[in-house]
Image (cartoon, helix red, strand yellow):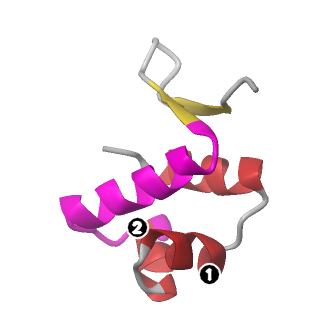
Amino acid sequence: MITRAQLKMARAALGWGVRDLAKKAGVAATTVSRYENGADAYGDTLAKLQRALEAGGIVFLNENGDGPGVRLKKR
């Protein structure tokens, strides 16, 4: 599942606000904010967020010693 840091990095890379991501993922904006600020989220919610970000062009990177990250898809 995606980490809080990945979620924030992915939103920044796409130029999306919390409300933008929430709308695209079909979740409440408060859910996105709470997760980014340390609250737990259900696996289904995280999967929705990840799918929305991937549809927007984000690729999630696995840990490689430096920790997980994100990048934009090559067009």
Q: How far from the left and from the top, in percent, is residue 19?
A: 62, 81
What is the magenta segment's predominant secondary structure?
helix
Residue 22 located left or right of residue 8 = left
- Please identify the quarter of the rendering in which residue 59 is found: top right
Residue at horizontal 72 percent and vertical 65 percent from the top:
16
- Distance Cα–Cα, label 2 vs label 1: 18 Å
Taking the magenta stretch, the answer to whether it contains residue 33 is no
Say if 4 sits above or below 75 in the image.
below
Residue at the image point whose x is 64% and y is 42% from the top: 57
Write down the residue under mark 2.
Answer: 38
> Label 1 amino acid?
Arg
- Give the magenta-colored segment's residue range: 36-58
> Which residue is at 54% across, 49% downward?
55
Circle 2: is it few (<14), some (14-19), or many (20+) Cα within 10 Å? few
Q: Nearer the viewer, residue 28 or 37?
A: 28
For image coordinates 79% across by 59% down, the residue present is 15
Q: Quadrant of the N terminus?
A: top left
- Identify residue for label 1: 19
Task: Return the disc, 2 or 1, that comes first in the chain's sequence.
Answer: 1
